[in-house]
Amino acid sequence: MKAKRIELKRKSAKIIRIVTVPPVSASVLIALLALSSDGFFRSTSEILISIIFIVIFPILAYPVSYLSGHVCSKKREGQRELAMWLSLIGYSLAVMSGLSGNKSSNLIFIFSVYLVSAALLLLFDKVLKIKASGHACSLAGTVFIACYYYSLLAGIIGGIVFAIVFRASVVSGRHTSGEFVTGALLCAFAFLMSWICFFV
């Protein structure tokens, strides 16, 4: 009976992590901003750019990983590494398109948060050899930005979701509590640095 409960917890944790992967949380953020009464997006092209570079590029890691023999051989870790690199490329293109296309400073700020977060994740992973949760980093970004632009209530709801995913990540064994918290702190730093650059 105990073994069944443990297995059920692990399956539930896996489902929670799947439905809150970075592209999904980014999609939720874009939807919230698009529905905002303040009219955050100034045109349809801004929404499309956000979807292409913030949502679709990271998703490409999944199909590409199956096409690449090298990545497949490294299994989940290879997929994670590929996702980080594709995210960095997508976010870089987002910032460049924002700057070259005369997009609003608010939109470029959000792109910058994603870009700096991805760069920090790679720095910690490849240079410092410190594993930080990309899942936590992305989810924290959604919570911070939703709270900043949408409402405090959105931030509170996001915080609750973050706590649930935190628990699911630890239970499933995908991350330690330290790795998850480190990922969130990297995003907090990226948010702060981007905010200072654009609004101070």
Image (spheres, helix red, strand yellow):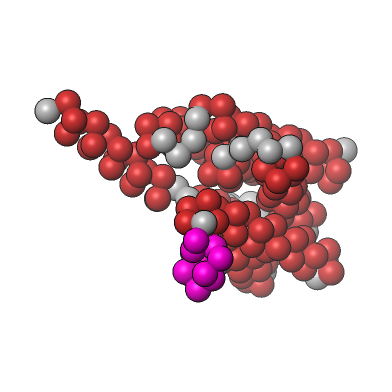
Name the side, left or right, on which 161 lies relative to 180: left
Q: Please identify the quarter of the rendering in which residue 150 is found.
A: top right
Of residues 193 and 21, the one nearer the viewer is: 21
Picture quarter with the N terminus: top left
Position above or below: 3 against 44: above
Name the side, left or right, on which 195 lies relative to 143: right
- Report x, y in % for residue 179: 57, 32
- Report x, y in % for residue 63: 48, 69
Of residues 39 and 24, the one nearer the viewer is: 24
Position above or below: 155 against 57: above
- Report x, y in % for residue 106: 74, 52
> What secondary structure prevails in the magenta region?
helix
Identity of the residue drawn at 84% across and 38% down: 196
Identity of the residue drawn at 17% across and 34% down: 4
Q: Most extreme residue toward the left, as rendered?
A: 1
Residue 86 visible, this angle: yes
Picture quarter with the C terminus: top right
Residue 41 visible, this angle: no
Count of all numbered marks drawn on residues in the image: 0
Identity of the residue drawn at 60% across and 54% down: 81
Identity of the residue drawn at 79% across and 43% down: 194
**Does 136 appear in magenta?**
no
- Report x, y in % for residue 30: 57, 56
Of residues 135 and 32, the one nearer the viewer is: 135
Q: Please identify the quarter of the rendering in which residue 94 is found.
A: bottom right
Position above or below: 62 against 146: below
What stretch of residues is rendered in magenta? Answer: 61-73
